[in-house]
Amino acid sequence: MSSSTPPARPLGRKPRVAVVGAGVAGLSAAYRLREHAEITLFEQDDRPGGHANTIEVEENGRTLGIDTAFVVFNQPSYPNLTKFFTELGVETKQHLGGFNFFDLDSGLQYGTAEMALPEEEVNSRYSEEFRTIWREARRFHAEGRKDFFRKRTDLPLGEYLDRGGYSQEFRYGYVILLCTAVWSVPAELIWEMPATTVIAFFMAHDEGGLGGRGVEWRTVSGGSINYVRKAIAAIDPKLRLAEPVTGVRQEPDGVTVATVNGAERFDYAIVATHGDQARELLTNPDDVQRRTLEKIRYNSSTAILHTDPTAMPGDRERWDNWNYGKVTVGGAVRPYVAYYMNRLHGFEAEQDYFVTLDYPRALREESVIRELSYSHPVIDIDLRRLQQTIYQVNEGTRVKLAGSYFHSKQLYHDQIGSHEAAFSSGAEAAAQLLRELDDQR
């Protein structure tokens, strides 16, 4: 935390603020500052939005907007984002949750309907593998809730499941599939996640996670690109696309932002990037910034928008919004997610469109529309414990930080890694800057 107070800017002039990163955290910060500062928004890509990345596909003279990362939200778990959409006049539509699990090796398949069946019907109609998964899912959600409130879940998920004696069938036929979809991390990192974070997510939704029906899920009509366009119009920043920032240096009287095109001076900066990127960009971080960023890890996932149905269950009647698959490749169990975008976005089309996340097999080359790489924070015990003090990193500094590696203050320490967490962190960084500007008057 900086011990010096930044000198006041000349009266009558709005501060010049550089926002580095035009994803949801940067858009949120810029939106909060739009009436109080001259904003320059830097983005390394040739488009704003970050994980709000809609691919617009032409089909028979009409445009279909298909999201490839951020797809759905709900008001209880995304309160600030929901309010933002309302202020911008963003049109959204209801998304009816639903999921399907399928094992390409064994042929085991079950989904929303089967998980809701009474025990006697499960016992009479289904295999021992599914009966085990069904029973342990019920136990996990019941015991997990009790353990959460008794503060017995502050340990890695793998250890929590070991302690509870949960089977391999449940771990690989339920836990890995759901968690891979929610947090976009590979199977081997799921066990490092805090049990409390996983349990809190299911408590806030239901046993189906993203594919559950315990909350009213919604999706942006026409794709999330529509909220990004409205946000940019409302902010009206100096938008510097395809201009990667290479360094951010905090000085006593300002901030120097270096890009591939040269260096520029600002009064303040908000670095709204992934935490590992921020670590590389800050050329002279203070001790709090350094400690905050030093242990944050990220994982990259490959998302592919395509039209190849071989990634889906063979029985088309089983296709749901969220399809959690697993298959053995090279001797290892590989889970993946297949989003059926026609159902997720609620549009009618001649083609079936899918987004698969880390699909381990080859797709038909002619079916691939776009292949994309996304990075997400690895949510482990260290990152969750960091949330206790993480917002102190922005106190008294000319360079503020924001990103989904922060939690949403309204929803406490387990809301990490989501669009809501990123949006909330950007708004908080801007609010902290405005408080400090007020103190200088």
Image (tube, helix red, strand yellow):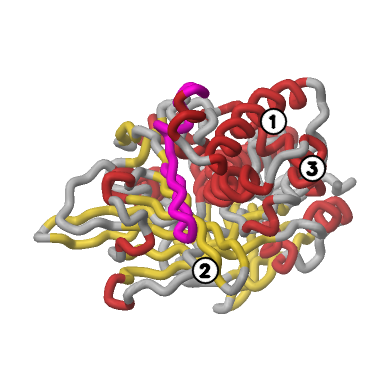
| Structural crowding at the residue carrying mark 3, measured as other residues with C-alpha within 10 Å and reported as few (<14), some (14–19) or many (≥20) | few
The mark tally for this picture is: 3
Circles 1 and 2: CB distance less than 8 Å?
A: no
Return the disc, 3 or 2, that comes first in the chain's sequence. 2
Q: Quick one: SS at disc 3?
A: helix
Circles 3 and 1: CB distance less than 8 Å?
A: no
Q: Image height check: is 254 above or below 167? A: below
Taking the spot 85% from the left edge, 51% from the top edge, the residue there is: 288
Return the disc, 3 or 1, that comes first in the chain's sequence. 3
| Structural crowding at the residue carrying mark 1, measured as other residues with C-alpha within 10 Å and reported as few (<14), some (14–19) or many (≥20) | few
Percent x, y for residue 8? Answer: 73, 45
Residue of label 2: 44
> Which contiguous range is marked in magenta?
100-120
Residue 19 as seen in the image, left or right of residue 5: left
Q: How far apart are marks 1 and 2 (CA)?
A: 31 Å
Q: Quick one: SS at disc 1?
A: loop
Residue of label 3: 162
